[in-house]
Amino acid sequence: MQDIYGIKNEEEKLLERFLRYVRIETTSSSESSSTPSTACQWDLLKLLEKELIETGLSEVELDGNGYIRALLPPSPGYGNVPVIGFLAHADTASDVSGKNVKPLVHRSYSGGPIELKGARLDPGDFPSLLKYRGETIITSDGTTLLGADDKAGVAEIMTAADFLVRHKEIKHGPVEIFFTPDEEIGRGMSKFPLEKVKSVFCYTLDGDGEGNIETECFNAWAVNVKIKGRVIHLGSARGKLVNAVKIASEFVSMLPSSESPESTDGRFGYYCPHSISGTLEKASVELLLRDFDGKSMENRIKAVEETAKALENLYPGSKVETVFTKQYSNMIDFIGKESRGLKLLFEAVGKSGAQPAEKIIRGGTDGARLSEMGIPCPNIFTGGHNYHSREEWAVLSSMVKACSTIVALADLWASDR
């Protein structure tokens, strides 16, 4: 690591901050209509507000919906530099429990399997572990997720902001910092205070392995398939009962198995039945549609509509309704319009000592939504791996490089005038 800014000296402070954050439960919930969707998110958000104020940032605000905005004032004489922003989300996914996270720090990793209570990290299954032999690896104890998605990003932004406040020799323009709730349930930008944003370009810290720069993501839609059947006593059901549960299960079975998350990778999209529930009379299927190509997404939407009509014909007396909700668009359509921010990002990653690698993300981020809202926002690596699982792990040296990338961006935007 070339460490031209001296960020390596912040390593233990960064680790301490990260461990403090992951111990706080912030699981979001799609079943809630409030913002944030869970009360526990406030615990971390209020702590971040307090720490931002103590660090010396100005305009620190935590609004009533759980969004934080703060400003790192420019160095003297650099007030005319374009404002840039850094963004991360406070919540964690509900796929695996995020309650009572007990992080474990594995120093001088040997290169062998890491045995946890409910999981095992084996280089045979996760070969990227071998790249970090001798490094410090952080995991949970195996009974929960770790929460590096996205508390690694939160810790890196906070550490970089603190570093820039203390190291006034590094000149920078105005820098905005944003922390959001509910990204994991697709609502991270739903009530984002866009009217207060001054940044011309933003960067999310919500990526994965070291050096990765994500500039392209899925187009994403959610579909609520509402099924209405006809109920009668089962003893006299012949020729009369229309079973909504059966129709729901048949709907799922009609989705092409070769176009599912577990059967695709790279640029191939998919259909994903996310949940199914119901009774004889009413049932519903929550379906996710993903595709990088806009035209292909149109075809997926059409296929779902035709499947619903086919089931209505197959089960006379039933009603199958599809309600489509757009979640986010492929961010490359918006980021590509501003080349300067990307050019400086590649340069900044190189300055951190990491090898920049542009890649696609088979998912989405708040950055994708913000890009669509008019502020280009590519995604930067955080050093985390195996998100949303008990096998989640993070590399401290990669986290330091992500932190260094933030500092380098602030520096480069100020010097590239």
Image (tube, rainbow, N blue to C red):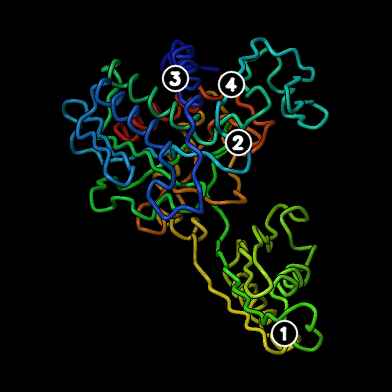
Mark closest to the chain's N terminus, 2 or 3: 3
Mark closest to the chain's N terminus, 4 or 2: 2
Position of 228 relative to 297 (above/below): below
Mark 3 vs 1: CB contact within 8 A: no
Residue beneath the point at 67% across and 77% down: 303
Position of 158 relative to 3 (above/below): below
Q: Which residue is mark 1?
A: 310
Label 1: which secondary element: helix
Label 4 crowd (10 A; few <14 / some 14-19 / many >=20): some
Label 3: which secondary element: helix
Label 4: which secondary element: loop
Q: Position of residue 317 (x, y in %)?
A: 68, 88
Mark closest to the chain's N terminus, 3 or 1: 3
Distance, label 4 to label 2, CA atoms, is: 12 Å
Give the residue type at disc 1. Answer: Ala
Q: Which residue is mark 2?
A: 97
Q: Which residue is mark 4?
A: 102
Distance, label 4 to label 3, CA atoms, is: 14 Å
Residue beneath the point at 45% across and 46% down: 182
Q: For this rendering, which residue is in front, 408 or 158? A: 158
Apparent side of residue 247 relative to residue 174 in the rendered image (left or right) = right
Which image quadrant: the C terminus?
Answer: top left
